[in-house]
Image: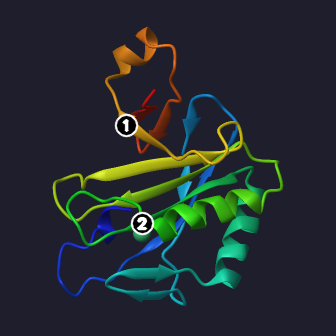
């Protein structure tokens, strides 16, 4: 994902889907990030995945025991914030699971810092119509706090803001 950060003016948005072996685990671990795919429609401020390829990716990951848990994409801004459309997309993807998935992530990757700033938001059925930001916390504080939804993205521990 980091290699697709939009660090130059001519870089287009890139994205894909996130997969985990146990999609309902309290401590969700992302094991695979797919995309971008050659037939995605991309511009500086938009990324629209090629649905056919995305379906193939999903089936291929499923064969290996991995389940879709979210989307990632880049933003041409230092501190990435999901747009209203990003939020709606996350809701739509979650709805497509017809209740079989508790939550769905929307990860946006900024274009400055190394590693790039990352924003992780989640929509979920247990908190329907809410939209929660997950923030990175030291691993030691995860053990000390009770209201957490730890998520690991490429080894970084991220927890839900109460
Ligand atoms: Zn976006």
Residue nearer the viewer, 81 or 19: 81
- Left or right of residue 92: residue 8: left
Residue 74 spot, x, y in % from top left: 36, 68
Residue named by callout 1: 135
Q: Residue furthest front?
A: 129
Q: CA distance from mark 1 to mark 2?
A: 18 Å
The secondary structure type at the circle numbered 2 is loop
Up-down relation of residue 19 to residue 148 (above or below): below
Who's the residue at 57% across and 45% down the image?
130
Quarter of the image for the N terminus: give it: bottom left
Q: Quadrant of ligand 1?
A: bottom left
Residue 78 spot, x, y in % from top left: 20, 61
Residue named by callout 2: 83
Instruction: Determine whether the beta carbon of the residue marked 2 sits less than 8 angstroms from the nearest atom of ligand 1.
Output: yes
- Decide: marks 1, 2 in contact (CB < 8 A)? no
Q: Quadrant of residue 92?
A: bottom right
Who's the residue at 17% across and 79% down the image?
8
Q: Residue furthest top?
A: 144
User: Callout 2 environment at 10 Å: few (<14), some (14 to 19), or many (20+)?
Assistant: few
- Left or right of residue 64: residue 74: left
Up-down relation of residue 129 to residue 9 (above or below): above
Up-down relation of residue 68 to residue 143 (above or below): below
């Amino acid at each position: 994902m980091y290699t697709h950060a939009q660090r130059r003016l001519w870089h287009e948005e890139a994205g894909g889907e996130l997969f985990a072996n146990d999609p309902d685990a309290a401590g969700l671990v992302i094991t695979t990030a797919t995309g971008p795919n050659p037939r995605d429609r991309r511009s500086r401020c938009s990324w629209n995945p090629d649905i056919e390829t995305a379906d193939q990716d999903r089936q291929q990951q499923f064969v290996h025991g991995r389940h879709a848990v979210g989307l990632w994409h880049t933003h041409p801004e230092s501190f990435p914030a999901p747009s209203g459309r990003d939020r709606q997309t996350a809701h739509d993807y979650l709805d497509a699971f017809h209740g079989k998935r508790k939550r769905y992530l929307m990860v946006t990757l900024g274009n400055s810092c190394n590693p790039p700033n990352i924003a992780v938001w989640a929509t979920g059925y247990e908190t329907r119509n809410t939209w929660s930001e997950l923030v990175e916390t030291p691993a030691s504080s995860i053990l000390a706090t009770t209201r957490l939804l730890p998520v690991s993205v490429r080894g970084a521990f991220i927890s839900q803001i109460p």
